[in-house]
Image: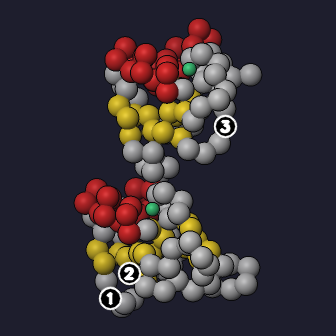
Amino acid sequence: MAKQVEHLGPAELAKLKKAKLRYAQYGSNVCNFCGDTTANYFATGDYTIRICPVCFEQFKDKFEWEEQDWRLGRGQEKYLKGAKLKYVTDFKKFSDTWDHEHCEFCMDKFMEAEGCLREGYCTLDEKNWICQTCFDDFKEMFKWTVVDRES
Ligand SMILES: [Zn+2]
Ligand SMILES: [Zn+2]
């Protein structure tokens, strides 16, 4: 059972004070405040505490919550801050078993398939992919440089 607000300990309540919460599109859980199980939730960066939109509105002033873009908060700054990126115009599968990648921020899919992304940015080792929208939204925050080719 998820802990509800009256059961949250001092450490958890302290963690919620002035927390940056982001909208968690994925996964399911129980609202730690009211027990609702039907909505998408706001969650702390480590996903340990989830709050439904109703409770978010109700308690945001009390806890001084700040809403963070749902695409952030998974530690991307650790491996993508200041990264060199290259622009790819035609995504190709790497092998038969490695045929797609996901945007590191919005999870959109790069793949040689209908409705999937074919253009976007990736790190020079092609391990991390970023779609155009997320590139535009986060390029200042992450201070990326785009290079023509690996040098
Ligand atoms: Zn709730
Ligand atoms: Zn994206």
Type of residue at label 1?
Asp
How far apart are the alpha carbons under marks 3 and 2? 35 Å
* Extreme-top residue of the structure: 6
Say the numbered circle drawn on residue 86. Answer: 2
Quarter of the image with the N terminus is top right
> Which sits earlier in the primary sequence, circle 1 or circle 2?
2
Does residue 95 lie above or below 76 as drawn? below
Say the numbered circle drawn on residue 28. Answer: 3
> Which sits earlier in the primary sequence, circle 3 or circle 1?
3
> Which sits earlier in the primary sequence, circle 3 or circle 2?
3
Residue 100: quadrant of the picture: bottom right
Type of residue at label 3?
Ser
Q: Nearer the viewer, residue 121 or 78?
A: 121
Type of residue at label 2?
Lys
* Extreme-left residue of the structure: 140
How far apart are the alpha carbons under marks 3 and 1? 41 Å
Query: CB under 8 Å between callouts 3 and 2?
Result: no
Query: CB under 8 Å between callouts 1 and 2?
Result: yes
Which residue is rendered at x = 63% and y = 22% of the image?
36
Which residue is rendered at x = 67% and y = 27% of the image?
37
- Mark 3 vs mark 2: give the one in front: 3
Q: Is residue 8 visible?
A: no
Say the numbered circle drawn on residue 148. Answer: 1
Query: Where in the figure is residue 77, as x and y percent of width and height?
Result: 40, 56
- Element assignment for label 3: loop
Quarter of the image with the C terminus is bottom left
